[in-house]
Amino acid sequence: MPNQPCCLLAAILRTLKQLWSRPAPLIPQAKPFLSCGDLPGKPRKKMPATTKRPLKERCSVQWMVITVLIVLTLLGLLITGAYFLKILIDTNFFFCKTSFKFIPRSKVCDGKADCANREDELMCVTNLTINSSFPVRLVTNSSVLQVYTRSGSWRLVCGEGWQIQHTQQVCQQLGFSSNPSSSTVAVNLLPSSIKTGFSAVAPKNGTASGISDLLTDKPSCTSGSVIALSCSECGLTLGLEDRIVGGTDTTVEHWPWQVSLKINGQHTCGGSLVTPRWLVTAAHCVASTGNEVDQWTVQTAQTSLSSSGEPVDKVIINGQYSSENNDYDIAMMRLVTPIKLQGTSYPVCLPPYGQQLKANQSLWVTGWGYTQERGKVSTILQQANIPLIDRATCLQLYGSIITPRMLCAGFVQGKVDACQGDSGGPLVLMDDRWQLAGIVSWGVGCARANWPGVYSNVDELLDWIYTVMQKNP
Ligand code: ARG
């Protein structure tokens, strides 16, 4: 309907005009507006017989309409004003609830307490640096358990004496809490590279802080088998078949760990759920923006980008991240409410330690990033199938800027690649279940020949991931 607001305005004006002008034929000499409420006792002219409404009633209707209009207009102005004022205050100031005062935003998360109770320094993005490897790890595709025991070596754990509470303890130590289970694997089926020693649970007095306190080294396993663990529900999809530049539309059911990270409702980066509460993303997504945790929200379980999102209560950046060469480009966020495991939201598995990816291994990258080098984000989730580029070729193309924490994937001839806005998102592979092999990190332009995408190498960052989850249960 064209000019609708105009018509409405015209109609209101017309009604007002009618109310105004109707008395004219009834009153021989129309009184001025202000004389509407005649003083009591003042003699009135006699009404003609045809008059339906008394003068007093007509006047009060006029007044009522005008008053209502004025009140509505004032109210509207007041609400709009208050709204903009709130936005202005919120963007420039932080309110200290305990000391009941406003401080400038720049003083929030600056390392100095400006509110009572350090309220302005409590919900900040933090850094975590680790200087030793995590003492428990799962190796090979069957997730065989290796523990760094007090004798200072990595040891497999024999099946004898192992109980459900040991499984729970180790999985908890690794940061997982849901439905853990264990199985046994025959020692003679394992590659010799992981047979660096054996151990078994032995009854102990006193308190054990980690599983290693319960283990004693052994020359071999009497049962002939060792423990393998399944600590998390991960890596399964309901996607039936099996932007990214050069990708295709997809749905979140195919990649249910894919999330969108937002600042003030705006998509900024991708991320991957690795547990119902924790997601992995790139450090550069977080380091360059939003120092305050509550600026961030996470959109889960959705194929199309929207402004909706879930709150987070922890944002942790790898302390060794370098903005100069993007080394250690990894960060993690924790959702306030764990996701419900379902077809549209489900964590991806972390890879086993020391997994050797094969050159040309088929990988998938997903995200809502630019569909062209100088393009726009895509509203529909995109996927692209790209091969792993072996380390030698990666080093040849990019030179020594490539560190062990990086890997290259894509095509040397270009055309298909991740791009701006895909950062932090998953690079996954299918091996029994979907595993996270990489995190979209950087590149030279997008999809250019000889400049494939560079990803954070998750295998080299597992110690950091497990430490973050263990320290923040
Ligand atoms: N750094 C980019 C981002 O923040 C991602 C770059 C990935 N580039 C590439 N050519 N693969 O979204």
Image: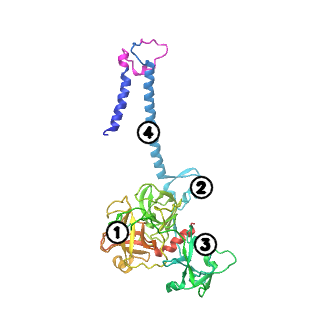
Residue 116 marker: 2
Q: Are marks 1 and 3 in contact (CB under 8 Å)?
A: no
Image quadrant assignment for residue 454 = bottom left
Mark 3, secondary structure of its residue: helix
User: Depth check: 238 or 264 in front?
Assistant: 238
Looking at the image, the residue that sits furthest to the front is 240
Amino acid marked by disc 2: Ala
Between marks 2 and 1, how big is the CA–CA gap?
49 Å
Position of residue 59 measured from the top left corner of the image (x, y, whole percent): 43, 22
Q: Which mark is residue 169?
A: 3
Residue 132 visible in the picture? no
Depth check, mark 4 against mark 2: the one in front is: 4
Q: Distance from label 4 to label 2 (Cα)?
A: 36 Å
Q: Closer to the N terminus: mark 3 or mark 2?
A: 2
Tag in front: 3 or 2: 3
Q: Position of residue 399 (x, y in %)?
A: 36, 78
Which residues lie in the magenta part? Answer: 23-46
Chief SS of the magenta region? loop
The residue indicated by pointer 4 is 77
Looking at the image, is mark 3 or mark 4 earlier in the sequence?
4
Is the residue marked 1 within 8 Å of ligand 1, measured from its CB?
yes
Compare marks 1 and 3 and give the one earlier in the sequence. 3
Q: What residue did someone put label 1 on?
A: 417
Q: Secondary structure at mark 1?
A: loop
